[in-house]
Image (tube, helix red, strand yellow):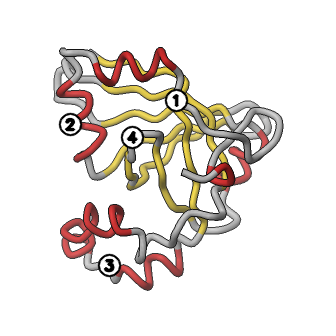
Amino acid sequence: MDDATTVGRHEFPVGIEVSEQVRRVLVAADAAELRDHLLHDVVGWLTTVAPDGRPQTAVISFLWDGDGILFYSRPDTPKIRNIVAHPDVSFHLNCDPYGDHVVIVEGLAGVAPREARSDVHRAYRRKYREPYEHWDMDPKATADEFSVPIRILPERIRSW
């Protein structure tokens, strides 16, 4: 991964490195379900903080690539303005009806201008081929509309 695809609290971009704490969580013997959710869940819930301090949550499609979470946004959205003002975010995956299988990623988010468009990003295209068919979405038109790549660098992962 390239330096220009990463985030920092005060300036973007900075070098990427998933913390040792996060790596330990991801490779733990009991983390198979966590890894499965990160790799295969189609949508998750991103919570950003508005400039006035109010939390705002939005559903997003995403790609976990082992170093972080990549997703795409429409330009000039509250989500992007929030991330610019407050890069700290929380990302939650859907759990079962009883809350027994929870995945929460906390980290820093920032616009990642050097990431490939979603319609040419090989792993993203592969993951979303079937969901796009289900949603009746054209990959090129979707990439045109959701043209801003954003990356989340995980600082902490909680799961149970």
Does residue 24 sit above or below 11 in this rendering? above
State the CA–CA distance, disc 1 to disc 2.
Answer: 18 Å
The circle drawn on residue 159 is none
Please report the residue visible at 30 percent of the width from the left and 39 percent of the height from the top: 38
Q: Amino acid at mark 3?
A: Met
Earlier sequence position, callout 2 versus callout 4: 2
Q: Which residue is mark 4?
A: 66
Say which element carries label 1. loop
C-beta proximity under 8 Å, tags 4 and 1: no
Mark 1 nearby-residue class (10 Å; few <14, some 14–19, many ≥20) = some
The circle drawn on residue 137 is 3
Q: Judge by depth and name the residue closer to the eye, 122 or 50.
A: 122
Give the image location of residue 35, x and y in percent.
25, 33
Which quadrant would the C terminus be assigned to in this image? Answer: top left
C-beta proximity under 8 Å, tags 3 and 1: no
State the CA–CA distance, disc 2 to disc 3.
Answer: 25 Å
Q: Amino acid at mark 2?
A: Asp
Give the number of the mark in front: 3 or 4: 4
Give the image location of residue 17, x and y in percent.
57, 32
Q: Amino acid at mark 4?
A: Gly
Does residue 1 sit above or below 154 in this rendering? below
Say which element carries label 2. helix
Q: Which residue is mark 2?
A: 36
Earlier sequence position, callout 3 versus callout 4: 4
Give the number of the mark in front: 1 or 2: 1
Q: Amino acid at mark 1?
A: Val
The circle drawn on residue 18 is 1
Quarter of the rendering containing residue 130: bottom left
Quarter of the rendering containing residue 93: top left
Mark 2 nearby-residue class (10 Å; few <14, some 14–19, many ≥20) = few
Please report the residue visible at 53 percent of the width from the left and 77 percent of the height from the top: 145
State the CA–CA distance, disc 3 to disc 1.
Answer: 33 Å
